[in-house]
Image (spheres, rainbow, N blue to C red):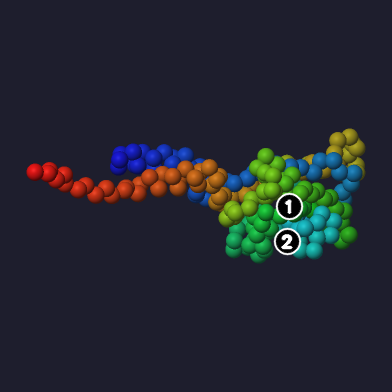
Amino acid sequence: MKRCALFALTFALTCCPCDASAGLIFQRTFGINRSINIFDTDRFDLDLSFGDSFFSPTNQVTLFDGTVITPANVNDTLEVTPSDAFFAEAAARLTDGIDDFVHLTFTEDLDSGLVEQRGWHESLFFLGLAKEGVPDLIGATLERIRLQINRFDLISPLQSSSGPPVNLQLTVSIEGTAIPEPGTIWLSLCGIAMLRVTRIRVYPRTSSL
């Protein structure tokens, strides 16, 4: 009996994914490469925001606010952690189970600079991970959000107009601890339950004379 219970517990625990420990939860690469703008500078402010609307959110939370990047930042990685301002609010937005918006703003670092914007519903941003009724990272504990600059090309007004005026490729990575799948939880509970050994009381046989 004990041997069977031990086997059941071992099986349940080995079936648990690595979600129990902190690690990479989600990663996606996206870009801005279809701009109609011809920019006048190679310095841009980059903001990653989360809110309830694309055009005029009432509860927007912004990360990397004030971060300026140039083509020289290719291969650089920006990151925010719980010690940074607004990280907790952004993490709450990404794990509340509501299909809000992820919003990227790319603005010339000039007075009245030109702006490029891209946005997605969370259910589309987390495409491949989101499920029906679960549009975001609901239940997860977030520990770090990274933004890597993979490519950043600009075409000035003096150059050929062929090709995109800007080609910015970014990878966003979200690290933390995700909740296990329901099936994993069930297996773990079954393994633990089988460790409960039922005590059987044995009565001595009595012979009648």
In the image, 196 versus 170, the foreground residue is 196
Q: Residue furthest front?
A: 209
How many marks are shown on the rendered structure? 2
Q: Nearer the viewer, mark 2 or mark 1?
A: 1
Q: Is residue 110 left or right of residue 90?
A: right
SS class, disc 1: loop
State left or right for residue 159 relative to residue 82: right
Q: Residue at x 67, y 48 (%)?
A: 134
Q: Is residue 121 in view?
A: yes
Question: Which residue in the protein does label 2 denote?
Answer: 61
**In the rendered view of the protein, which quadrant contains the N terminus?**
top left
Q: Which residue is mark 1?
A: 99
Mark 2 residue element: strand
Q: Position of residue 10 (x, y in %)?
A: 39, 41
Few, some or many residues within 10 Å of mark 2 (<14, 14–19, 20+) = many
Q: Please give left or right for residue 196 compared with residue 21 in the image.
A: left
Relative depth, front residue between 68 and 189:
189
Q: Residue at x 73, y 61 (%)?
A: 61
Quadrant hosting residue 109: bottom right
CA separation, marks 2 and 1?
15 Å
Most foreground residue, 200 or 91: 200
Which kind of residue does numbered mark 1 sit on? Answer: Asp
Q: Which quadrant of the figure contains the C terminus?
A: top left
The answer to whether residue 28 is seen in the rendering is no
Q: Nearer the viewer, residue 28 or 163?
A: 28
**Residue 184 at x, y = what percent?**
51, 43
Which residue is located at x 31 percent, y 48 percent? Answer: 198
Q: Are marks 2 and 1 in contact (CB under 8 Å)?
A: no
Which numbered disc flags the more N-terminal residue, 2 or 1?
A: 2
Circle 2: residue type: Val
